[in-house]
Image: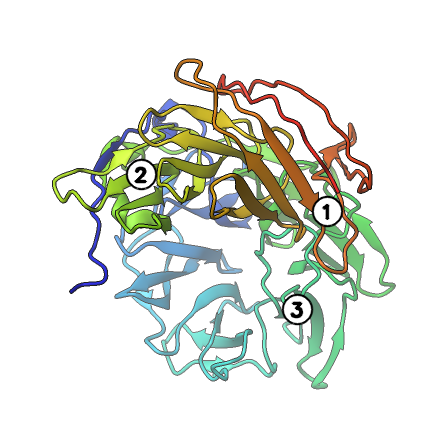
Amino acid sequence: MALWSPVLLPVLFSFSVAAAGAAGEARFMTTPDIRGDRVVFAWEGDLYTTSAEGGTAVRLTSNPAGELAPKLSPDGKSIAYSTFDNGVLDVWVMPSEGGAPTRLTWAPLGGQVVAWTPDSRHVVFRSRWGVPPAARDQKLYQVGLDAAMPEPLPLDRGQDCSFSADGSKILYVRKGNEDYYWKRYKGGQYPDIWMADLTARSYKAVTDYVGRNAYPMWVGDTMFFNSDRGADGITNLWAQDLKTGALRQVTTHTDFDVMSPSTDGKRIVYVQSGYLYVLDTAGGAPRKVPVRIPSDDWRLQDRWINPSKYLHFVDVADDGKAVVVAARGDVFHLALADKDTMPRNLTRTPGVREDTPRLSPDGQRVAYFSDATGEYQLYVRDVASGDTTQVTTDLDRKVHHPRWSPDGKKILFGDKDFSLHVVEWTSPRKSGRRSTSRATSTTTSSPGRSATTPGRRTAGGSRTRSPARTATTRSSCTTRSRAGRSSSPTTSTRT
């Protein structure tokens, strides 16, 4: 007897989105580079070029494999880039005005383009070739325009680099992941920047900050680079005097990180909030570059999607007769006992994401998290009637792993702070499609931590957390979410 059979969840997902290319200014360009008045970048898997002042972009490539990381040569004649040809990331070069490309590397020695040598004769790329299987970092190689065998740079490892004007020294990211998205990350993958003197074969660390130090750009006696060392943890451009070590913050974005900066020695181009910006290295404020890209936006058109290819979470009923599945932000229910029954989409909430559904022991209700209010809150839905109850109202951090108690009267879940929360569940009083219920929640700390409540944000944006209370505190409240759902009156107990 088969223990498991595939479950097909056919459903129509309709996306009502405007065509960005046809409607106006384009967004979400990646890996830009600048040389004089020209900017090149990747967008929707192809390479484009436009003026540093903005305007309508011209497409340079149309390979279905997709291209990334374009770099203009110092002499302005060529563009090096990487593409997944036949599923392998390799280095290619093409005329800067467009035209037939030339392949420079072949598997297994290929990788992502990071720079040109100052004489425009070699392309520098990073690759895992020659790196032990268990190692996290990569090595830097250079390949000539004649497509000869690539040669490793005299560095033990490297992720990115920038040459001095005469090519005798290199600023390079020795380790780490320069594009991680974890705020205030201090773990082992934070990138640091070193300097290598290729003539003297000497090496020294340039940055000592434990955090993001990425995308070094050598401009005169100054290194421009990305860092999240500011008080708000947002990645901005910083500048460091290579002689004195003096630091100064160059950009002051407060909402989204500065990403993928690159320079020609006079100006820096980067992506921020999905838009292109150009900054004069001699001083001044960054300037947004308006770009229009004519496109049919085929990726945004309404289409049929089989969510069985996008399963995020599965839970099976205790009796094995039903299953709930989270796929593409909706919760589906399937009665396994009836092979003719199609899966039911229980939530059907475009623009809202539901996650980690759990069936109650009797199979009549499903608990799950939803971000309908802007933060993930716990909901319980009746499988048969669809009546829905918002159980929590003040969670403000990532929550996970909901579990029903064997008697179906409590729900346990955890959060990113390793705290455990218990909600006592009682049967709802019928009041139309959405219902109300009474619940008692208990918050306990993990071992080695003081007990705290989920906490709220202050006006300045920081979180405050209430200390644990040894006495029982009871309160009753009713709130309404943005989606129009009334939450249940709750009686909460915190220990």
Q: CA distance from mark 3 to mark 1?
A: 18 Å
Q: Is residue 311 above or below residue 473?
A: below
Within the image, what quadrant is residue 360 found in?
top left
Camera-side residue: 256 or 480?
A: 480
Q: Which residue is mark 3?
A: 188
Residue 86 position within the rendered picture, expressed as x and y whole percent measured from the top left: 25, 66
Q: Earlier in the sequence, mark 1 or mark 2?
A: 1
Q: Residue at x 40, y 44 (%)?
A: 361
Q: Earlier in the sequence, mark 3 or mark 1?
A: 3
Crowding at label 2, few (<14), some or many (≥20) Cα neighbours within 10 Å?
many
Assign a secondary structure to mark 1: loop
Name the kind of residue labelled 3 in the image: Gly
Count the marks: 3
Camera-side residue: 256 or 121?
A: 256
> Can see residue 54?
no
Q: Residue at x 73, y 40 (%)?
A: 453
Within the image, what quadrant is residue 460 found in?
top right
Within the image, what quadrant is residue 286 found in?
top right
Q: Which residue is mark 1?
A: 233
Q: Which residue is mark 2?
A: 332
> Can see residue 357?
yes
- Outermost top residue: 432
Select label 3 or label 2 by which is in front.
Answer: 2
Q: Along the horizontal axis of the image, is 74 left or right of 334? A: right
Q: Is residue 200 above or below residue 17?
A: below
Assign a secondary structure to mark 3: loop
Q: Along the horizontal axis of the image, is 470 left or right of 39? A: right
Q: Residue at x 50, y 84 (%)?
A: 132
Residue 158 position within the rendered picture, expressed as x and y whole percent measured from the top left: 58, 73
Residue 25 position within the rendered picture, expressed as x and y whole percent measured from the top left: 45, 28
